[in-house]
């Protein structure tokens, strides 16, 4: 069964819709909580809601930088992200959670707007990653979507002990 380029681009747009919906989930799961509650580690030795938001913002910025490079350069070398040595995360955890959440949402809107404007072929601009042999803009966006979904599930787990889930 063959797919037209238009069918493949529909998948790109579906990924962007998921990123939009996931941003709404993040906002909802963090709503109604003050700084103390957001920073509380409700699961011992695991990140708090605030720390998860900080990680998601840091990763979003890294992934956006990778996308920028793939769109601007021919097959740039992509460096593996080292979550354990992320200076951005360390900086973000010292800011108010509301600032980090606002930056995540503003950055998300900007990223989605940029990706929506890409022609289908731009989604397949490639980079060279040490772990992933088929690395392009599409792969990076899909990876981001699944990575974030994993952390949203963790956010749900961290949120449950803090009271009724918001609607």
Image: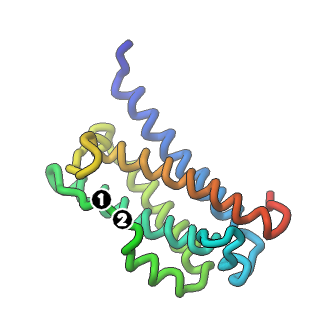
Q: Position of residue 153 (x, y in %)?
A: 64, 54
Can residue 24 be seen here? no
Q: In the rendered view of the protein, which quadrant contains the N terminus?
A: top left
Q: Position of residue 119 (x, y in %)?
A: 32, 41
Q: How crowded is mark 1: few (under 14 residues within 10 Å), some or many (20 or more)?
A: many
* Rendered residue at 42%/26% (across/down): 7
- Quarter where residue 37 is shown: bottom right
At numbered mark 1, what does the secondary structure look like: helix, strand or loop?
A: helix
| Of 88 and 161, the residue lying toward us | 161
Image side of residue 147 versus residue 84, left or right: right
| Of 148 and 114, the residue lying toward us | 148
Residue corresponding to mark 1: 66
The residue most toward the left is 74
The residue most toward the top is 1
At numbered mark 2, what does the secondary structure look like: helix, strand or loop?
A: helix
The residue most toward the bottom is 94
Q: Residues within 10 Å of mark 2 (few under 14, many from 20)?
A: some
* Rendered residue at 45%/52% (across/down): 144
**Residue 131: which disc?**
none
Residue 7, above or below 93: above
Can residue 98 be seen here? yes
The residue most toward the front is 45
Q: Where is residue 138 in the image (x, y as percent from the top left)?
A: 36, 43
**Residue 62: which disc?**
2
Q: Distance between the residues labelled 1 and 2?
A: 6 Å
* Rendered residue at 57%/80% (across/down): 99
Does the CB distance between marks 1 and 2 fall below 8 Å?
Answer: yes
Q: In the rendered view of the protein, which quadrant contains the C terminus?
A: bottom right
| Of 138 and 153, the residue lying toward us | 153
- Quarter where residue 59 is shown: bottom left
| Of 114 and 103, the residue lying toward us | 103
Q: Where is residue 134 in the image (x, y as percent from the top left)?
A: 27, 40
């Amino acid at each position: 069964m063959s797919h037209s380029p238009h069918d493949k681009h529909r998948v790109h747009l579906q990924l962007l819709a998921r990123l939009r919906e996931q941003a709404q989930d993040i906002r909802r799961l963090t709503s109604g909580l003050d700084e103390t509650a957001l920073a509380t580690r409700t699961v011992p030795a695991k990140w708090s809601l605030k720390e998860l938001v900080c990680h998601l913002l840091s990763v979003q910025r890294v992934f956006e930088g990778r996308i920028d490079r793939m769109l601007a350069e021919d097959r740039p070398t992509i460096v593996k992200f080292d979550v354990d040595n992320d200076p951005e995360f360390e900086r973000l955890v010292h800011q108010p959670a509301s600032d980090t959440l606002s930056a995540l949402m503003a950055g998300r809107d900007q990223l989605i707007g940029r990706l929506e404007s890409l022609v289908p072929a731009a989604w397949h601009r490639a980079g060279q990653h040490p772990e992933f042999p088929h690395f392009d803009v599409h792969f990076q966006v899909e990876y981001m979507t699944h990575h974030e979904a994993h952390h949203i599930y963790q956010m749900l787990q961290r949120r449950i002990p803090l009271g009724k889930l918001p609607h």
